[in-house]
Image: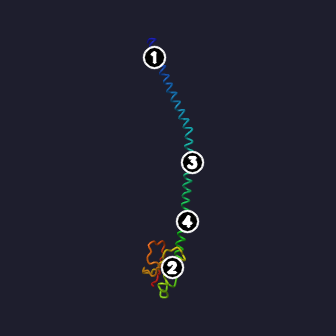
Amino acid sequence: MTNQQQSIMDLELGQFNSDSNKKKSFNLKNKATFLAIAIGTIPVLITGATGYYFANKSITKEIITSQETQASEVQDKIGRFMQERLGDIQVLTGLEAFTNPAKSTQTEKVDLLERIEKAYGVYDSIAVFDIKGNVNCSNRQRKKNLIITLIVLIFRQL
């Protein structure tokens, strides 16, 4: 090999070596950057995910507790409402106007039902049925928008 060829080869090798060094330093630089980003980001992500998990768990538990409380309150209100209606039915079934129908006229029965409706303030109409399902007495003949109707069944034939 001639000197000139050797010089050209050295130059080419030198350039190759410097390109290789640039690639190595570039890769090392990238690795250092990625490592720095990872060191700064991963703890933040872990902390955020952990915070989200526990906050979500706490909020979910709070919502469930609130819904259970509301359901319990509604159940209690419905139970009291039904107990009151049962008491009203028991009072009506014990009235002599309905247990002994011969002692009072139909007008007196209707007047009695209207007074009960006004006194309680809960009912839209009240009807008393016999055991066969026939209407014995009602304070409303026809009303389109019935909100609450108290229906009383007398369990003995009238």
User: Cα distance, mark 2 to mark 3?
Assistant: 63 Å
Q: Residues within 10 Å of mark 2 (few under 14, many from 20)?
A: some
Give the mark nearer the N terminus: 3 vs 1. Answer: 1
Horizontal and vertical percent position of residue 56:
54, 52
Give the mark nearer the N terminus: 1 vs 2. Answer: 1
Residue bearing mark 1: 9
Give the mark nearer the N terminus: 2 vs 3. Answer: 3
Give the mark nearer the N terminus: 4 vs 3. Answer: 3
Residue bearing mark 3: 51
User: Cα distance, mark 4 to mark 3?
Assistant: 33 Å
Residue bearing mark 2: 114
Q: Residues within 10 Å of mark 1 (few under 14, many from 20)?
A: few
- Check whether the beta carbons of the residues at disc 2 and disc 3 lie within 8 A of each other: no
Q: Secondary structure at mark 3?
A: helix
- Check whether the beta carbons of the residues at disc 3 and disc 1 lie within 8 A of each other: no
Give the mark nearer the N terminus: 2 vs 4. Answer: 4
Residue depicted at 56% across the width and 51% down the height:
55
Horizontal and vertical percent position of residue 25:
52, 27
**Residue type indicated by callout 3:** Gly
**Residue type indicated by callout 1:** Met
